[in-house]
Amino acid sequence: MNRDLPVPASALAIGAHPDDTDFWCSATLAKWAEEGCVVHHLVCTDGSKGTWDAEADLAELVATRQVEQRAAAKALGATGEVVFLGWPDGELSDGLRQRWQVAYWIRRLRPDVVLGHDPWKRYRLHPDHRHAGFLTVDGIVAARDPHFFPEQEIAPHRPSALLLFEADEPDHVEVVDETHVARKVDALEAHRSQFRSTMHIDEDDPARETQLEAFRTKIRNRLAEAGTLAGALYAEPFKSLTDL
Ligand SMILES: [Zn+2]
């Protein structure tokens, strides 16, 4: 198990939905931000399926989720861009148009490290996570080579490392401390619209506080479990690719 990349000058976390990067890599982003790394976020879909309320105003939900993702980035100490590609939730594909966009943002933001969903995770159901993973990998290949999408008229850019989260075969951990864990929890709690459907917290339930505490414990336990891979208290696990 490899441990801790050198702190990059800039990083770009690519998630399928608002909240994905907060679940999978935000303690690492908080650690790097604290060390002066400029942390950017790219969210592929609009998050418009993220409610159990059949009557919900979906345009309002999309707007709310953008506000929440920006607040989450701020909670981590991220100072970079928060970009929304806005593809309909549940309908993301890894076609050329989407790849064009991801390559464009990689070239424009010029991150040293890119983080994204592992597209090769077996038995995963959600298509957006799979497609966002392929877009991350394919976007890097396009961004690094001048003959891909030359009409973008931006210099090619080759990141030095790719960290895949929700990895099928993790081989790398980023060790984090209590502060980074707390920032991760804050970032996750910025996604209030997701409390009920994703985090099992019902705002109207008298047991709300207990549910919130159970959620925090679950996140902390997950980080502690990854920590054992590195003999540390807390960590986030990844598959690392450094020959890009
Ligand atoms: Zn997601």
Image: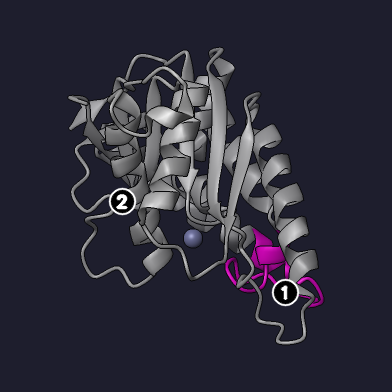
Q: Name the residue: 30% across, 20% down.
A: 160
**Kind of residue at disc 1:** Asp
Looking at the rendering, the stretch of residues picked out in magenta corresponds to 192-212
Residue annotated with mark 2:
134
**Residue 29: image x %, image y %?**
51, 30
- What label sits on residue 25 in the rendered view? none
Question: Magenta-highlighted stretch: main secondary structure?
Answer: loop
Identify the coloring.
one colour
**Vertical comparison of 45 with 205: above or below:** above
Q: Name the residue: 59% across, 66% down.
A: 199
**Residue 71: image x %, image y %?**
73, 41
- Judge left or right: residue 235 versus residue 193: left
Using a 10 Å C-alpha cutoff, classify the residue at mark 1 as few (fewer than 14 neighbours), some (14 to 19) or many (20 or more): some
Near-viewer residue (224 or 24):
24
- Judge left or right: residue 23 versus residue 212: left
Near-viewer residue (117 or 46):
46
